[in-house]
Image (cartoon, helix red, strand yellow):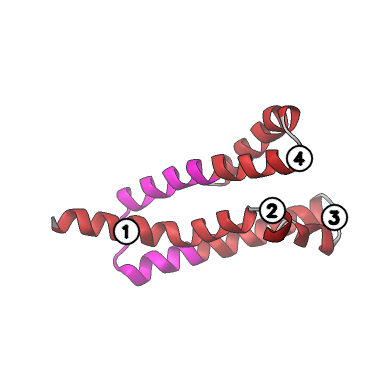
Amino acid sequence: MLAIAIANGAFRQLVFARLFPELYAHQLSTLTGSILIGAFIWFVVRTWRPASDRHALLIGLVWFAMTLAFESFMGLVLQQRSLSQVLHEYNVFAGRVWPLLLIWVALAPWIFFRLRAKSASN
């Protein structure tokens, strides 16, 4: 998942940032990242099926926490941004849709687990 996120970020900088204003590039990159990471999560859940709803939710919450920690580390330590700058990325009211990707990462394992369980019972 990390490789997908890094590749998506690089694509954003090389393509979207040159074609669109920063906010639109951010939003489009969040959409493409959500699709790519969703495909990865679907593959993982299909290949290594969680044991239960609870297990699928736990996987999502762990991925959520790891993503949040990684992004915070990148912003605060490696990019040496202030806390207010890092928190700005989570301001949905300013058009920052990054929190939606975090919610997707948290819930996607459970959603795909449930979809697979539903299709198996039909």
Mark 4 packing: few (<14 Cα in 10 Å), some, or many (20+)? some
**Residue 117 in which image quadrant:** bottom left
Q: Position of residue 58 (x, y in %)?
A: 44, 68
Magenta span of residues? 34-61
Q: Looking at the picture, which amino acid does disc 2 mark?
A: Arg
Q: Residues within 10 Å of mark 3 (few under 14, many from 20)?
A: some
**SS at badge 2:** loop
| Three-letter residue code for mark 3 | Arg
Please state the total of marks drawn on the protein image.
4
- For residue 22, the mark is 4
Residue 31, quarter of picture: top right
Residue identifier under label 3:
81
- 10 Å neighbourhood of mark 2: few (<14), some, or many (≥20)? some
- Secondary structure type for disc 3: loop
Kind of residue at disc 4: Glu
Q: Can residue 23 be found in the magenta stretch? A: no
Q: Which residue is mark 2?
A: 96
| Residue 38 is inside the magenta segment | yes
Q: CB under 8 Å between callouts 2 and 1?
A: no
Residue 59, horizontal then vertical, whole percent: 44, 63
Q: Secondary structure at mark 4?
A: helix
**Residue ID for mark 1:** 113
**Residue drawn at point x = 86 percent, y = 60 percent:** 82
Report the side of 82 relative to 88 (left or right).
Answer: right
